[in-house]
Amino acid sequence: MSDWIRVKWTEAGQVLRLLGWPEADGPAATLPPHAFFEQLRKADRDDDAAEFLALALPRWEAVAWAARAVRELTDDDTIDPGSAEALKAALLWVQDPTEPRRRAAQAAAETSAETGAARLAALAAFYSGGSIAPLDCEPLPAPRDAAGRCAAGAVLVAAACAAEPASALARCLEAGAALAASRAED
């Protein structure tokens, strides 16, 4: 198990409080985030591990993890055009996280007919920073946990739709943990 050098939180409890989980007040709250994540995995709580990881990661990394997981697990032959556009918008934002691309991710998510993994990945990009209010209104920041919750949802939905959901989620969790442990230039 390696340290998560991209994660800024020093204790699992900081992430657990964002999630509103009861463990935030228990002895596990003082564990480093990567150690708590490993405990979740060992306890066969992979859905919870996905939620924890998505909130532990910085927002860009959470969106990148989710968008890449959705891309890997989505069958290009069966994805509807709206979902394909939402996934494309999320991946473009990851490639170049600018305000126009963040707003484009929102627009793609809103026009997507299906409420699925791709739409959630695009919403994660939109909630990653900046105002969520229309451009002609006073700025309104996204809830602190919105990007992570959407990213976790994208990963969980994409894995659930895979031919082998448990192994798909396990691969996603391994990729997310590797991202958390990698240097920014990796």
Image: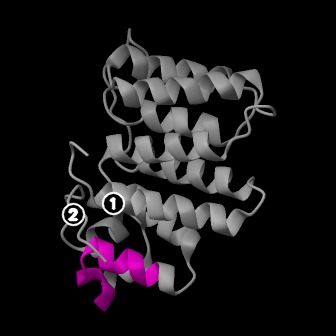
- Numbered tag placed on residue 29 in the rendering: none
Above-or-below relation of 21 to 157: below
Q: Quadrant of residue 2?
A: bottom left
The image position of residue 25, as x and y in percent, is 32, 83
Residue at numbered disc 2: 9
The residue lying toward the viewer, choosing from 76 and 42, is 76
The three-letter code of the residue at mark 1 reads Ala
Contact between marks 1 and 2 (CB within 8 A): the answer is yes
Majority secondary structure in the magenta region: helix
Q: On the rendered structure, is 170 left or right of 73?
A: left
Q: Is residue 76 magenta?
A: no
Q: Is residue 30 magenta?
A: yes
Q: Quadrant of the N terminus?
A: bottom left
- What is the residue that sits farthest to the top in this orientation? 136
- Name the element at disc 1: helix
Q: Mark 2 Cα within 10 Å, few/some/many (few <14, many 20+)? A: some
Residue at numbered disc 1: 56
- Residue at the image position 32 percent from the left and 86 percent from the top: 28
Earlier in the chain: of badge 1 and badge 2, it is 2
- Residue at the image position 59 percent from the left and 21 percent from the top: 108
Q: Quadrant of residue 179?
A: bottom left
The image position of residue 39, as x and y in percent, is 42, 84
The residue lying toward the viewer, choosing from 130 and 102, is 102
The three-letter code of the residue at mark 2 reads Trp
Give the colouring mode of the picture. one colour
Does residue 132 appear in the picture of this structure?
Answer: no
Q: Mark 1 Cα within 10 Å, few/some/many (few <14, many 20+)? A: many
